[in-house]
Image (cartoon, rainbow, N blue to C red):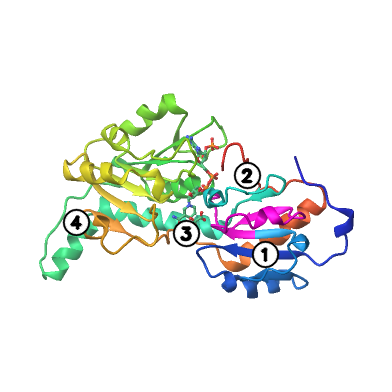
Amino acid sequence: MTAMPDAACAGKRPCVALLSSVLDMSYLAPAFREAMPAVDLRLGADLGALDEIDAAVCWYPPPGVMARMPRLRLVQSLGAGIDHFHTDPDLPRAPVLCRIVDSDMAGTMAAYVTWAVIHRQRAMGAYLASAGAAHWQEQPIVPPGRHCVGIAGLGTLGVACAQALLAIGYRVRGWRRSAKHDLPAGIESFHGPDALDDFLSGCNTLVCLLPLTPQTHGFLNGPLFRRLPHGAHLINVGRGSHLVETDLLRALDDGTLGAATLDAFAHEPLPPGHPFWRHPRITVTPHVAARTEAIAIARQTRDNLATLDRGARPAMAVDPALGY
Ligand code: NDP
Ligand code: OXD
């Protein structure tokens, strides 16, 4: 159901609140003022009159605040994922929930995933160690056409990664929830739980680009690792809670997995004492695989509000029942 414009709002300056319980959102203010010169921007501890707020732009929103915004029409995520909305158990039902879909974000993610695949597949870790010892030492070379990368979550970002990898010559397969026939040529496509075993059995590298939902929580676990070719490389750029951490450590120790590249963690920042930091076959990056620029967030918020004003549903609206 699309929220209809409120006659009382007509002509009113758009009022946008920037809400996070973990981030200082003030970095977004200049971009919002550029994209929406008339904006009434609210941030910080004092949000003013809550009944004036049209849109909340969120990353891990503080619980209960949006429930006190009766005019709220749009809840806009700072990122592609909306799982962080659920830190607010009182998230109101009426506003439309939107995520970010952005070509720069897709390109940045594709570059990260391509780097992570090549880093492992071309033994860059071993070359860095050899270089440190001034040791001229070749590693085996396997052409990309003999290495299959499987992408679990073949949506906006998954397809961008698939295209980048295909362009270099890797074999690429993807797994998604539903059957779709609009995929770029060259991607071997699988869908649904019944196809998961077939999909996994061919993945020399497995990339997780799923959204975090009740169905995908704990998806990366011991039984799944054992369905991959022995010694596969895991790249998790989804969410930390996709991964069962103890199962990963066990799978690396017994050789089920050969390596892991992890960008998202259940607790961020990853605590200094966490075993992932020092594991010789885990590469940790601090949730930087992709990022949306402030101006893109501001423009999408503006455009989504304008779409709602026309009585239409924004293209970036998520389905609350599916959770992504
Ligand atoms: P999309 O919604 O475009 O794609 C999600 C994909 O996952 C779709 O192909 C969907 O299937 C599939 N999917 C969802 N649920 C299931 C399921 N139960 N079983 C199988 N497949 C499923 O999202 P994006 O590509 O834009 O983003 C994906 C995720 O990437 C985000 O939710 C976020 O967690 C993560 N992310 C991480 C970043 C980082 O810096 N580490 C940056 C940005 C995003 P279908 O196509 O059938 O709907
Ligand atoms: C996102 C993210 O969801 O940055 O966009 O993780």
Q: Quadrant of residue 265?
A: bottom left
Looking at the image, tell me whether mark 3 or mark 4 is earlier in sequence order.
4
184 vs 90, left or right, is left
Q: Which residues are magenta?
A: 57-82
Q: Quadrant of residue 320?
A: top right
Q: Which residue is mark 1?
A: 17
Which residue is at the front of the view, 28 or 40? Answer: 40
Q: Position of residue 29 (x, y in %)?
A: 64, 73
Q: Is mark 4 within 8 Å of ligand 1?
A: no
In the picture, which quadrant includes the N terminus? top right
Q: Which residue is mark 3?
A: 290
Q: Nearer the viewer, mark 3 or mark 2?
A: 2
In space, the residues marked 1 and 2 are separated at their CA atoms by 20 Å
Q: Residue at x 59, y 67 (%)?
A: 294
In space, the residues marked 3 and 4 are separated at their CA atoms by 24 Å
Q: Which residue is mark 2?
A: 318
Q: Which residue is mark 4?
A: 280
In space, the residues marked 2 and 4 are separated at their CA atoms by 39 Å
Looking at the image, tell me whether mark 3 or mark 2 is earlier in sequence order.
3
Q: Is residue 77 above or below residue 16?
A: above
Badge 1 element: strand
Look at label 4 and name its amino acid. Pro
Badge 4 element: loop
